[in-house]
Image (tube, helix red, strand yellow):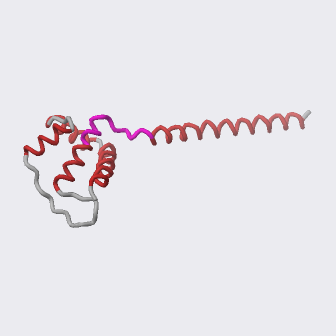
Amino acid sequence: MLMYSFKLFRRVSMRLYALIMVVMIVPVAVSGCRTAGNTGLDADDLRFAGFYSDYLVESGVTSSDEDVVLAPLSSEKMNSMLARHDLKPEDFRKKVRLYNQEPERWKLVIALVRSNVQKETP
């Protein structure tokens, strides 16, 4: 009888161990899959990143190791680029304030901007 109890305990404990491992591993795996497809940026962030990418390319920033000579853009050019990306000056200012408050979001935007600039420059 004691041997049967030990075998039953061992079977239950192995199943319990397996269940605990699944409960611990599955949420981590699911969150990894979810974040891989979702950058955490909203549509406004994507428009801002598009604008900022264009701004850097237009002002002379390149993705290569060349010396960068920035060309200041006129206010007309800036307004034109903002309009092209469907951003109003006030929306732009709000986003800049938000990025100051949320540095992790800013890092995501900058990563997207870098990718965009690399695609746009030789």
Q: Quadrant of residue 97?
A: top left
Residue at x-position 79% and y-position 36%: 11
Looking at the picture, tell me which residue is in the foreground, 54 or 9: 54
From the top left corner, tell me how far across and down residue 37 is, in percent. 44, 40
Name the image quarter holding the N terminus: top right
The stretch drawn in magenta includes residue 58: no
Residue farthest to the right, as pictured: 1
From the top left corner, tell me how far across and down residue 95 is, in percent. 22, 39
The stretch drawn in magenta includes residue 41: yes
Residue at x-position 75% and y-position 37%: 13
Looking at the picture, tell me which residue is in the foreground, 100 or 86: 86
Q: Quadrant of residue 106?
A: top left
Q: Along the horizontal axis of the image, is 71 left or right of 105? A: left
Name the image quarter holding the C terminus: bottom left
Residue at x-position 11% and y-position 45%: 77
Q: Along the horizontal axis of the image, is 96 left or right of 13? A: left
Residue span colored magenta: 37-48
Total marks shown come to 0
Q: Along the horizontal axis of the image, is 119 left or right of 74? A: right
From the top left corner, tell me how far across and down residue 51 is, in percent. 22, 43
Residue farthest to the front, as pictured: 122
From the top left corner, tell me how far across and down residue 81 is, in percent. 16, 42
